[in-house]
Image (spheres, grey):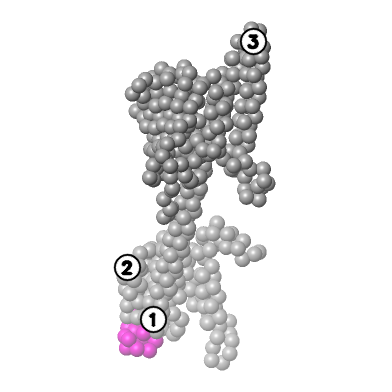
Amino acid sequence: MHVTGMRRWLARHDRIRDGLPAVVLILVAAAATAAGRTGWHPPRAAGVAWMALTCLPLVFRSRWPLPVVVLTLAADLTHMALALNYALAPAASLVALYTFAARTSRRTAWITGFLASLAITGVYAASHHEPLLVGTSLLRFDFAIAATALGDAVRSRRLHLARVEARAERAERTREEEARRRVTEERVRIARELHDVVAHHITLVNAQAGVAHHLVRTDPDRAYQALAHIKDNSRAALDELRATVGLLRRPEDAPDSRAPLPGLGDLDGLVGSMRGGGLSVQVVRTGLPRAVAPATELTAYRIIQEALTNTHKHASATQARVTLHYGASTLRVTVTDDGSPRPAKGEGTGHGLIGMRERATAIGGTVTAGPAPDGGFEVVAELPLALAPHTG
């Protein structure tokens, strides 16, 4: 049987495992009593029987370690006092002391081991008329202390291994929790991207489909134009959907198939699609236009896209104005419309307004939304032109 298999088998059979030292000690006792000055002779039955009686409690040493120490020590001391010609150390007591020290606290183990050492040394010295701390008496004292020390060392090693395993398990759980957290964040980010892409284009397609349905009999030319816009917007939605889902691909997975994420340079296309849906949009740039961090560009584009989509969907507006003001360190994005005012909902509790605010917060910006001073609705975003370096 393989060593590992043997260990597993012994772990399932406690009594057999605990009794193995007893078998070894009985065989050693038989060999010791069979050896004499003139050669080998049959083992002395009385000595072997006494050793077997002394070792009998060892079968339960892992279940009741302290009672086993008491029983084996009592038997060994009795044998030591009666059999003056018996030279073996109290082996069963040593095994019991080792087991007890390996399974109890250090203080209790050493108190018990020291008392047992004194008892063994005292009984041996008194019964054999030898000095207490010299010769064979001292050797038995050392044996008992050594058995206790060995058991204490095994206990310490087991505790150390248990702590190492616990730390490894905690580290593994921490890594798993961090991985789950990152997966959740990634899912939220992807859901937000998909919401922005799909909601914007489907809103436009729905509006243009309504226009086509209304004009298909009275004005076929305009209905045809509306259908063309539907085709363009649905194709744009698919392209942006592919680009967003493409973020999930690994670097080695067809990098040429990835489309760049939209930025402020794509505002003309966004505004054109909104105009095709019946919303007149004006874009005004003030300040000194200059390079903007890519994350800021994407955030600004998505905020404008979401604001215009909400305007077209909820406000019954006919006109909207997008203002990009380039300040010293911030880009101020303002989207206003002439539609019916919507409740601000405490800076926005709808998914669209929440998404705007989360996007802006992620790069160190802010978003406010509410009724405009001159009527209609207004969304204002303050975004940093350059992102602060990540300090981890």
Q: Secondary structure at mark 1?
A: helix
Query: Residue 121 appears at what percent x and percent y?
Result: 35, 80
Nearest-to-viewer mark from 2 and 1 = 2
Query: Residue 105 appears at what percent x and percent y?
Result: 35, 64
What residue does disc 2 label? 107
What residue does disc 1 label? 142
Q: Amino acid at mark 3?
A: Asp
Q: Residues within 10 Å of mark 2 (few under 14, many from 20)?
A: few
Q: Earlier in the sequence, mark 2 or mark 1?
A: 2
Magenta stretch in the rendered image: 123-138
Q: Earlier in the sequence, mark 3 or mark 2?
A: 2
Say if residue 333 shows up in the picture: yes
Residue 22 shown in magenta: no
Q: Amino acid at mark 1?
A: Asp
Residue 134 shown in magenta: yes
What residue does disc 3 label? 219
Say if residue 206 shows up in the picture: no
Nearest-to-viewer mark from 3 and 2 = 3
Front-lying residue, 30 or 217: 217
* Residue 242 quadrant: top right
Does 376 appear above or below 64?
above
Does 205 appear above or below 255?
above
Q: Verify CB contact (< 8 Å) between mark 2 and mark 1.
A: no
Residue in the image at 55% along x and 75% along y: 27
